Image (cartoon, helix red, strand yellow):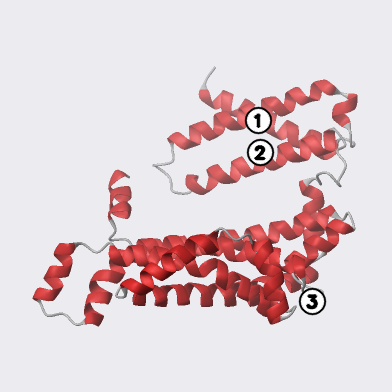
Amino acid sequence: MSQSIKNAVYIALILLQVIIVASSEIGFYKSLPLLILVLIAAAFSMAMLLGQLTNLEGKHKSIKVLIPSLFAFMLLLTWESVIKGYAVSPILMPAPSNIFNALINNIPMLWADFKQTYLKAVLAGYIIGCSSGFIVAQWAVRNQALRDALMPLGNFMSAIPIVGIAPIMVMWFGFDWQSKAAVIVVMTFFPMFINTLTGLQSTDALHKDLMHTYAAKKSQIFFKNQLPHALPFIFNALKLNSALALIGAIVAEFFGTPIVGMGFRISTEVGRMNMDLVWATIVVAAIAGSLSYGALALLEKSLLFWHPSYREGNNSR
């Protein structure tokens, strides 16, 4: 059998599974158990197609986007099939279609939650925490006493759980977004401080001697020597903190917030057993976190095109 015929069969099996899920009643696997074989065949077909696309990844750039998209489609199809086919209670796990409907039907509410949590608390805390960690690291690289004092404190603070910090910050700064931003500052300061300090100290001794030979000023040494070497470490901290900031804000909202916010929405709707809206809020948070991380990754790639890791990647392709 030629490869084109096999591919047509693979696509037909996947489409057949889509039709079964879309047209069947809830609990169809209970009444017709053998239909699960179609799902297994569809998953196998998708695996075969993805394997072929992986071999063509170097020839077409669009395949890099197509592969994870098809994998996500198959994952959602399997999720929908199992939930609907076995009539799983939506309290335990809602189907993707129900989550999507909740997302579409509650856009104004979810947008208000997003503004409160992300545009106010996350951005404010992230900017303050990362910038202050960066500035203090510049002082510490020139001050041994400050460096020795802050490094053990950073290890201590990283061991403190969010649930221990959040109630204290709510008592100090109130129930609005300021207390969540304060939690984020505490969570993001030390990762940025430690990474920046490590990066600034990673400068090659030969480069330092060369800068001194040319009688470079402190600002020139920093911008032309230390900062370029520290950028990979700084971006590691920025990407790590983009996730920590969102997690910190959502968890902090469990301990007190106005009647708006993603953390508030999750805790409230769980109490109402409205799991569709809970998962819709989680989807919004996941999208926001992914976009933040992706934007930082693109910025890193544009600024660090000279770095050996990026040059080696380009040469290998």
Nearer to us: label 2 or label 3: 3
Distance from Cα at disc 1 to Cα at disc 2: 7 Å
Distance from Cα at disc 1 to Cα at disc 3: 45 Å
Residue in the image at 22% along x and 79% along y: 220
**Whether residue 138 is situated above or below residue 262 in the rendered picture:** below
Q: Amino acid at mark 2?
A: Met
Q: Amino acid at mark 1?
A: Ala
Quadrant containing the C terminus is top left
Q: Decide if residue 294 is in sight here.
A: no
Quadrant containing the N terminus is top right
- Left/right placement of residue 179 relative to residue 290 reads right
Q: Earlier in the sequence, mark 2 or mark 3?
A: 2
For disc 2, the marked residue is 74
- Left/right placement of residue 204 relative to residue 194 reads left
Residue in the image at 79% along x and 49% along y: 97
Q: Earlier in the sequence, mark 1 or mark 2?
A: 1
For disc 3, the marked residue is 258
Residues at badges 2 and 3 in contact (C-beta under 8 Å)? no
Q: Which mark is residue 43?
A: 1
SS for dot 2: helix
> Residue 57, position in %: x, y?
43, 41
Q: 1 or 52, which lies in front?
A: 52
- Left/right placement of residue 123 relative to residue 32 reads left
- Left/right placement of residue 306 relative to residue 208 reads right
Q: Which mark is residue 234?
A: none
> Residue 44, position in %: x, y?
62, 27
Q: Residues within 10 Å of mark 2 (few under 14, many from 20)?
A: some
Q: Earlier in the sequence, mark 1 or mark 3?
A: 1
Tally of numbered tags? 3
> Residue 125, position in %: x, y?
58, 75
